[in-house]
Image (tube, rainbow, N blue to C red):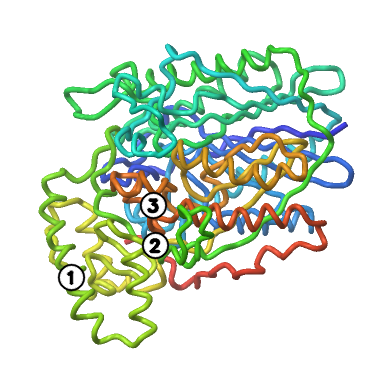
Amino acid sequence: MFKVGCSKKEIPCFFEGLGMLGYGKEGNDVKGVETPIFCRAFVFSTKGKIMAFVNAEICFFTMPLQKAVLDQLNVLHPGMFTESNLMLTAQHSHSAPGGIAHRVFYNTSIPGFKTEVFEAYKKGVVEAVMQALKDLQPARISYHTGLFAEDIEVAFNRSLIPYNANKELSKKYTEAEAHLAVDRAMKLLRVENQEGKLTGSLNWFGVHATSVSNDNTKICSDNKGYAAEFTENQQENMVAAFAQEAAGDVTPNFVWDKKKKWLRGKFEDDFESARYNGQLQSDMALKLLASTPENYLAEEIDCHTMYFDMGNVEVAPRFAEGKEQCTTSPACIGMSFFGGTKEGPGVPRFLIRMVNPIISFGKLFEKIFYRATLPKEEKLALDRKFAAQSPKALAMELGKGRIFWVSRMSRVFFVPDFVDPLVKMFRRLGREGILDKDPWGPTVLPLQIMILGHLAIIAIPAEITTMAGRRLRKSLLDVLSQRGVTEVILSPYANAYAGYITTKEEYMHQRYEGGHTLFGKWTLAAFQTNFDILAKEMLLQKDQRKKADALTVPYVLKEENIWTGF
């Protein structure tokens, strides 16, 4: 039998006045607490091997946080956990404090890196893993799946026009069918002890934890946190985690709020909507938990991690429509990102239309006049950027530290403050030299695969759309089926965070998701290329595999360059 330990620890994170991570909106700050924030850990052990899956009710993990957790665990249990056998995932709540990144971009609205938040999250994760280790006991694990009925108001595609552009679709979905343009399957692991008592439940279902809107000022675990609470209340001493799957274009919101001018959940009160959606997810989980366990997992554990520079990938032609020499480029944010989504609107569309000509002028200047002054190598890099990122209107180049083609900001920033509150913030950051330090976002990322029985759990350091998720699952299964894997489960928001992964067809429409697909139109193909490399390593014996840093070593940020706010 396996040995499995399941645990749950609260993360005390009420830090009044700090910005919440997710919406990037001024005023979305901590002023109260609606629900506690928890971290749940599952440790699996068999035949001398061990691995841990962690799910926290936060927005996402960062590489510095992952490293800090591993460092602390190695103090307590030297050599037990590595970047390969520990997977850190988040539910993606947008209503928990931020400040956990070492680079500027994802800390801007907080503002800055916040040691107190970072330490609270680290402590919660470490305590959860340690408790799960302590509670290891003989157990059996069964795998269950179930489809939500079409009339269950649990998940809706928020970006139908890009979704409908995908080549796999035989029909176009209307707004009335948005609930059908998502994956409605919940995947669940059921853990029972030797006596047959249920001790743990770990499931994956893709839907954004955005039932609570961006005008909120209370810490809240959102719909997945409520789902976990409702499920745990039905069984004494059981730990139930509700992890994300492919949720990039999936929302729990489906009612147009005429007053607020955005999509909300079933009720005017966001917390009531979050509870409603959480109850739907809980009901499905409880239904699966009540089914007869038949599909027990074989006693097998395997895991591996490798790092890749996602801004410098030459894509395998089979993932790029058969085309040769398709590449990614260093991370860029598109202007459409600042427009937000139907459930979290940002800059008004007319302002984006006003700024786009400035961006077009900058692109023309770079391609014709600036390019002529560059040495050959830099010309090639510039050409690569435009080929990879087109047709994105480049608002920010996170890898190069530029805004609207202006290098390192200096004191030059011609976009007025009224476009967005963050413009004022970036102006100040530029004046004080903060933007002159290090890249503003991550580019070297960890890709991880964990195998448990016949299941492969894939750690994705980003958020992935419905169709992109289908393609990635298929390409991984094509390889991993050679070693007995029959089911691929995606776990996004894992170990690090670098925006979105969309299909090329979705990217070309440059909605919010495409604008936040950092590495260009071939981002999905690049992830498929690199996961293919990783999956093939897992066909080899462990001692024959390339080490985690075989292709590139993760970038280490100097402590003196961490921006801690004003």
Q: Label 3, label 2: how many angstroms apart (C-alpha)?
A: 8 Å
Residue 63, horizontal then vertical, whole percent: 55, 57
**Badge 3: few (under 14), some or many (20 or more) residues near its Cα, within 10 Å?**
many
Q: Residue at x 14, y 61 (%)?
A: 415
How many numbered marks appear?
Answer: 3
Q: Secondary structure at mark 1?
A: helix
Q: Residue at x 52, y 50 (%)?
A: 461
Q: Earlier in the sequence, mark 3 or mark 2?
A: 2
Q: Residue at x 27, y 72 (%)?
A: 432
242 and 384: which is toward the camera: 384
Residue at image mark 3:
517
514 and 38: which is toward the camera: 514
Residue 441, horizontal then vertical, whole percent: 42, 61
Q: Quadrant of the N terminus?
A: top right
Residue type highlighted by circle 3? Thr
Q: Quadrant of residue 191?
A: top right
Residue type highlighted by circle 1? Leu
Q: Are marks 3 and 2 in contact (CB under 8 Å)?
A: no
Q: Quadrant of residue 355?
A: bottom left
Q: Earlier in the sequence, mark 1 or mark 2?
A: 2
Residue at image mark 1:
364
Q: Are marks 1 and 2 in contact (CB under 8 Å)?
A: no
**Badge 1: few (under 14), some or many (20 or more) residues near its Cα, within 10 Å?**
few
Q: Label 3, label 1: how many angstroms apart (C-alpha)?
A: 22 Å
96 and 497: which is toward the camera: 497
Q: Secondary structure at mark 3?
A: loop
Residue type highlighted by circle 2? Ala
Residue at image mark 2:
331
Q: Is residue 145 left or right of residue 297?
A: left
Task: Work out whether residue 78 can be spotted.
Answer: no
